[in-house]
Amino acid sequence: MNSVVRPLPVHHGVASDDFRGAMRHLAGGVSVITVGRGRDITGMTVTSVTSFSAEPPTLLVAVNRGSSSWLLLQRYGSFGVNMLSADQLDVAERFSGKGGIAGADRFVGAQWTTRVSGVPLLSGALAAIECEVEELIERHSHAIVIGRVLHMDVAAPGASLAYWQGRYVAVDTNGDAALLTEVSVPGQNLHRPRLIGR
């Protein structure tokens, strides 16, 4: 592992709340990260998943080091990335901790499968990806987790769940693709995605 660590000056010019407000303008696909095995499982709702490399298939996710997921991620060295469809809003809210639901109780109400690592994967997710931890890079309150893809289950295309401006939105491949095409035509109005949930 080659890492370059250098001290950076601390800047106090940007308030955390202002930064969070700015980041609300960035729409993100909603995924549930699952960790653990057997009954020793938990997970969290994130918008921080991104592709890292296609050769070999690898992805990145940011995990809060104060979360219960972080402890199990370190213990077992594997995780699941479950990309949610628009009709899986209830799963997103359970894994965000809404109503105080924690640990294995977050998995109630949905069907789950396991593969080689034993990490739970959501049946019916747009994509359920099993990963082993390749590297953990700890910075500030979070860690960047680099995961090597072990297995994938991919569903038929459907409306995706995204988070934008503090709300869940549905992004439909059929209707929204046509609307996005209109953006490149001068004089056309940009249409907003369909809001769902709260």
Image (spheres, helix red, strand yellow):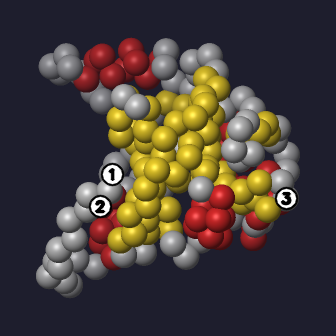
Q: Amino acid at mark 3?
A: Arg
Q: Secondary structure at mark 1?
A: loop
Residue 173 spot, x, y in % from top left? 48, 20
Residue at image coords 61%, 39%: 130
Q: Are marks 1 and 2 in contact (CB under 8 Å)?
A: yes
CA separation in Å, label 3 and label 2: 38 Å
Position of 40 compared to 135: left or right? right
Instruction: Of the two numbered discs 3 and 1 on the same chain, state the one appearing first in sequence.
Output: 1
The residue pinned by badge 2 equals 22
Q: Amino acid at mark 2?
A: Ala
Residue at image coords 73%, 36%: 115
Task: Kindly indicate the quadrant of the structure image that contains residue 35.
Answer: bottom right
The residue pinned by badge 3 equals 39
Position of 189 compared to 135: left or right? left
CA separation in Å, label 1 and label 2: 6 Å
Residue 47 spot, x, y in % from top left? 47, 50
Position of 96 compared to 178: left or right? right
Q: Front-most of 34 and 157?
A: 34
Q: The N terminus appears in which quarter of the rendering? A: bottom left
Disc number lying in front (3 or 2): 3
The residue pinned by badge 1 equals 25
Residue 99 spot, x, y in % from top left? 75, 67
